[in-house]
Image: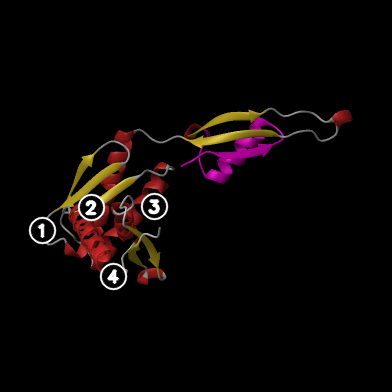
Amino acid sequence: MEGIEITAATVEEAIEKAEAQLGLSRDQFEVEVVREGKLGILGGKGKEVLIRVIPVTPPEKDAVKVVTEILDTLLELLGVTGKVEVLSDEIPLDLDIEGDDLGILIGRRGQTLASLEYITKLIVVGRLKAWIPLTVDVAGYKKRRRDSLQRLALYLAEQVTSRRHAITMEPMPADERRIVHLTLADNPDVTTQSIGEGESRKVVILLRQG
């Protein structure tokens, strides 16, 4: 979570405003005084204090424990048997759920998995009062999907180059479209763009102009 700037008559008042705005206690953020307040002439209103408030990210060990507990609880509520494995205990966290018959957690085009990850992030914010970058995967699905999309993007780029006309891919969620864009970002022959709205949004691969 990035820092925010807050003004008030005094540093103490600015800190109180920060606590109310962020929903955090004083020990959960750092304060940097950007501008000291100045009294106005003859008791008039002067310059207000300006502070920058930066939420403190909890220790990685605490974050790992909380995220693991949250995922275990969600699995229990969903009636799914799986084991949460921590692939990386450094920020950004990387977790994978292993087990049998976990397709229900992935869903069509990975939509259920995307929702599971998003809900996990929201609950983590509520628990730790900080946004923790993290990735949740199920039986390595995201890695396999990423590798598959990268191969497909490279193949379609060759087709666009040889046939000299654009190719539109099937609708994909934002994170998968990003994989295609990044895969072809440095390709000298083609470029990419997204079209459509909502769940119908898709990537078009077309010849690079000029």
Depth check, mark 1 against mark 4: the one in front is: 4
* Mark 4 crowdedness (10 Å alpha carbons): few <14, some 14-19, many ≥20: few
The CA span between labels 2 and 4 is: 22 Å
Kindly state the secondary structure of the residue where label 2 is placed.
strand
The residue indicated by pointer 4 is 170
Among numbered discs 1 and 3, the one appearing first in the sequence: 1
The CA span between labels 2 and 3 is: 17 Å
Q: Is residue 146 above or below residue 19?
A: below
Q: Amino acid at mark 2?
A: Asp
* Mark 1 crowdedness (10 Å alpha carbons): few <14, some 14-19, many ≥20: few
The CA span between labels 3 and 4 is: 29 Å
Q: Amino acid at mark 1?
A: Asp
User: Residue 100: which numbered mark, if any?
Assistant: 1
Q: Amino acid at mark 3?
A: Leu
User: Residue 137: which numbered mark, if any?
Assistant: 2
Q: How many numbered marks appear?
A: 4
* Mark 2 crowdedness (10 Å alpha carbons): few <14, some 14-19, many ≥20: many
Depth check, mark 2 against mark 4: the one in front is: 4
The residue indicated by pointer 3 is 122
**Residue under the image location 62 percent in, 30 percent down:** 34
User: Residue 110: which numbered mark, if any?
Assistant: none
Depth check, mark 2 against mark 1: the one in front is: 2
Kindly state the secondary structure of the residue where label 4 is placed.
loop
Q: Quadrant of residue 160?
A: bottom left
Residue range (magenta): 1-26
Kindly state the secondary structure of the residue where label 3 is placed.
helix
Position of residue 107 measured from the top left corner of the image (x, y, whole percent): 23, 66
User: Is 171 on the left-hand or right-hand side of 52?
Assistant: left
User: Looking at the image, which is closer to me, 205 or 35?
Assistant: 205
User: Looking at the image, which is closer to me, 107 or 72?
Assistant: 107
Residue 48 located within the stretch drawn in magenta:
no
Position of residue 164 measured from the top left corner of the image (x, y, whole percent): 29, 68
